[in-house]
Image (tube, rainbow, N blue to C red):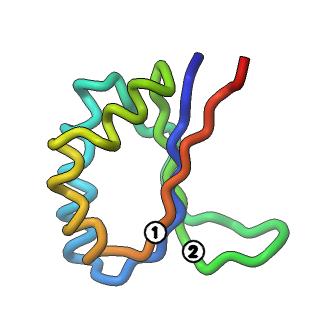
Amino acid sequence: MPAYITVDFSPTDKEKLQEYGAAVPASLTKFSGEYLVKGPAEQLFGDTEFQMQVILTFPSRELALAWYHSPDYQTLVPLRNAAMRSEFRLVHSVQ
């Protein structure tokens, strides 16, 4: 079953965000992850502090978690945290 990682974020350093954004795709490859969508998020209801959203898709929950916890991605976390305020969520089907 497919799984998705949703990322809500607001940039805090555009230069670092570009560097982070350029590095993430290579970390996804081993886990068959890919971008489903990324861009400005238009709020339809409720409150949020975030301006942008990314949705990553993976073939399974296990691969999504393996990517997030992988050394390749974890080395990017300090850069991510310097580039944006963010919230990551895993969404998957329950059988």
Q: Is residue 44 left or right of residue 52?
A: right
Q: Residues within 10 Å of mark 2 (few under 14, many from 20)?
A: some
Q: Which residue is mark 2?
A: 50
Q: Position of residue 12 (x, y in %)?
A: 35, 83
Q: Which residue is mark 1?
A: 86
Q: Position of residue 53 (x, y in %)?
A: 54, 59
Q: Nearer the viewer, mark 1 or mark 2?
A: 1
**Toward which corner of the image does residue 75 lie, by quadrant?**
bottom left
Nearest the viewer among 29 and 14 is 29
Q: Amino acid at mark 2?
A: Phe
Going by the picture, which residue comes out furthest to the right? 45
* Residue located 68% across and 26% down the image: 93
Q: Residues within 10 Å of mark 1 (few under 14, many from 20)?
A: some
Could you tell me which quadrant the N terminus lies in? Answer: top right
Secondary structure of residue under mark 1: strand
Instruction: Point out the tag, 1 or 2, that comes first from the N-terminus.
Output: 2
Q: Amino acid at mark 1?
A: Ser
Q: Position of residue 13 (x, y in %)?
A: 28, 82
Above or below, 1 against 92 in this view is: above
Q: Is residue 8 left or right of residue 70?
A: right
